[in-house]
Amino acid sequence: MLSEPRSGRLAAWGNALLAGLVSPDDAVLAIVGDDAVHRVEGLPGESAPVGLTLGLGRLRALGATGLRVALPAPGHPLGLSGPPEFNARALESEEAVICHGAALGLVPEVYEAGPAGDVHVEVVWHCLQVREAPPADVPSLGEAERELAEALRDATEVLSRLDVASSGPVAEAAIDAYRARAERGREVLAPGYPPRAVRVLELAQRVGLLVSLAYENGHGGAVSASEMTARGAALRPVERTARRAQVAAYNSVVEEGGR
C-alpha cells in the first residue's frame, strides 16, 4: 500500500470521464501515470487488445455508468461479487475494477522489463464477466472514517510498545518521499469526488504506508515470539481497515449515485 493501486486510478479517472468531467486524453494520462502503456483485452466485440481510450469508450457503450474498486486479500474478498473465476484472478492481482451498469470486471496484469531505474511497465487489463451483486464488505465513507480512527486508537499503544513504527532512516526516507509527493500538488482523486472521500483516502494511504514500513522493517522492538504475535495481531486489523477505507473512497461517487 505504499502507492495508490492502479485499479484506484482507473476507477477514479474512469468515473470522471463517464461523468463528462474530464477529457479522454486527460483521463488516460492520469490512469497510465508512470507506466508506458495500458491496454484492455477480452472486451466484448473486440478480437484483440485495444488502447485504454477505446476500451473506456467501449465500456460506456456496453452500459457501464460507473467503476468500482476491489482490493481483495486472502480471506477477505473486499469489493468482489463473483463469480469464483473472477474472484480468483482478482485475488491473485490483489486488485480489480468492477463496472456498474455492465456485468464486466477488469483485472490488471503487469509486465516489467529493463534494468533498475529504467523499468518499462506495460499493463494489460483483462476484461471478464462478473456477477451483478452488491460488492463484499464495502463500508460507507462515514463508516470507513470512523473505523480508521478507531483502529488507529486501539492499535497505537501496542504498536508504540513494540516499536513497529520505528523512525529509522528507511522509514524516514519513505515518509519524506510520501510528503514530497503530496506537496507537489498531486490530485488524490479525480474531479467529481466529495472532499470527504479525498480526506478518507489520504488518511488510508498514510496508514497503509506506516503498516508497510512496519512489515518491511523486520520485527522492530518485538524480540519474543509472544511480542511478534502481538505485533502481527495489531497490524492486521489496521491494514484491513485501511484497505476498506481506500475502497470506500474510490467507490463513493458510484455508491452515492446509487442512493
Image (cartoon, helix red, strand yellow):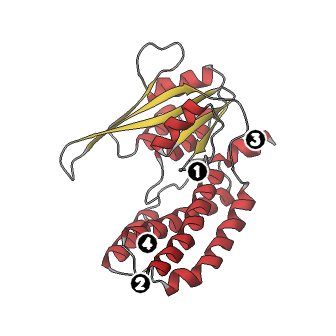
> Which image quarter: residue 176?
bottom left
Disc 4 on helix, strand or loop? Answer: helix
Pinpoint residue 51: horizontal percent, then vertical percent: 42, 25
Disc 2 on helix, strand or loop? Answer: loop
CA separation in Å, label 4 and label 2: 11 Å
CA separation in Å, label 1 and label 2: 28 Å
Q: Nearer the viewer, mark 3 or mark 1?
A: 1
Would you say the residues marked 4 and 1 are in contact, meaning their CB atoms lie under 8 Å apart? no
Disc 4: which residue: 214
Residue at the (44%, 12%) spot, across then down: 47
Please tell me which of labels 3 and 4 falls first in the chain.
Answer: 4
Disc 1: which residue: 75
Q: Nearer the viewer, residue 161 or 57?
A: 161
Q: Nearer the viewer, residue 233 or 181?
A: 233
Please tell me which of labels 1 and 2 falls first in the chain.
Answer: 1
CA separation in Å, label 3 and label 4: 37 Å
Q: Is residue 92 above or below residue 232?
A: above
Left or right: 161 in relation to 178: right
Q: Amino acid at mark 2?
A: Gly
Disc 3: which residue: 257
Q: Is residue 176 above or below residue 244?
A: below
Q: Residue furthest bottom?
A: 161
Disc 3 on helix, strand or loop? Answer: helix
CA separation in Å, label 2 and label 3: 46 Å
- How packed mark 2 is, by other alpha carbons closer than 10 Å (few <14, some 14-19, many 20 or more), is some
